[in-house]
Each structure stands twice: as C-alpha cells, then as structure tokens.
Image (cartoon, rainbow, N blue to C red):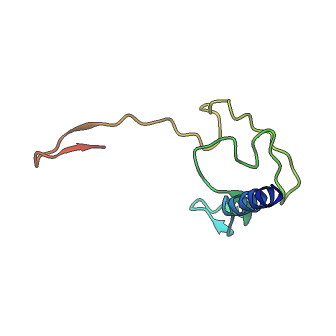
Amino acid sequence: MKTGFVLAAVMFAVSAAQAQGYVNPYTRSDGTYVPGHHRTAPDSNPHNNYSTQGNYNPYTGQTGTVDPYRQPSHSTPGYQAPQPQRCGTNRLGQYVCQ
C-alpha cells in the first residue's frame, strides 16, 4: 500500500513538471519587451493555470485571481471574437473553408 502511494506521488510530480515551462524573453512586433517567465502548458483547460482562482504560482508566490467560469468580454485584453467560417467550392471545384 505504501509503495502505491509513493508511486502515485512520483507520477503526479512528473506530470506536474511536464505541464509547465519557461518562456524566454522576447520583443513583440509592436516593440513591447516581454520578460522571461514560467507558465503552465498551454491548453484549453481554464482550471490548471497559475492565474486561476484556487491555484498558486510557485515562482511568484501569488495566488490566482481569474474566475475560470467568466467568459471573456470584448474589453478583455487580447480577446478576439470568433470568426465565422466561410465554406464553399473554389474555382477548381474543391470544397474549402476559410
């Protein structure tokens, strides 16, 4: 039983280590400098990010403040409204979506 617990703890630690990474510093195309930072692996799960309520960032010591159930609004920085797909037949007779 003890071995099973230890194995589960090790597997959790390994999966947690793989679910994060370091982003090197860079400069955006508009000239804004972004310093290097640690982040969780990008995915569509809003619950496993350092900034989400109930989570803790071990690198900064801050607790998350973002509500994972709040939908982004047009005033949210970086928000892009979903674009409708346009599908149809091109001049070569192929069905394509844009």
Judge by depth and name the residue closer to the eye, 19 or 62.
19
**Residue located 76% across and 57% down the image:** 4
Residue sitting at the far front: 1
Question: Can you say which quadrant of the picture contains the C terminus?
Answer: top left
Coordinates of residue 68 in the picture (x, y in percent): 69, 35
Judge by depth and name the residue closer to the eye, 68 or 32.
68
**Residue located 83% across and 60% down the image:** 59
Coordinates of residue 84 in the picture (x, y in percent): 38, 34
Question: Can you say which quadrant of the picture contains the N terminus?
Answer: bottom right
Left of 94 or right of it: where is 19?
right
Judge by depth and name the residue closer to the eye, 27 or 83.
83
Q: Report how many numbered discs are placed on residues in the image.
A: 0
Coordinates of residue 41 in the picture (x, y in percent): 64, 56
From what the image shows, is residue 18 above or below residue 77?
below
Coordinates of residue 72 in the picture (x, y in percent): 62, 33
Left of 88 or right of it: where is 26?
right
**Residue located 61% across and 53% down the image:** 42
The answer to which image quadrant residue 32 occupies is: bottom right
Left of 63 or right of it: where is 95?
left
**Residue located 69% across and 41% down the image:** 47
From what the image shows, is residue 13 above or below residue 75?
below
From what the image shows, is residue 62 above or below residue 10?
above
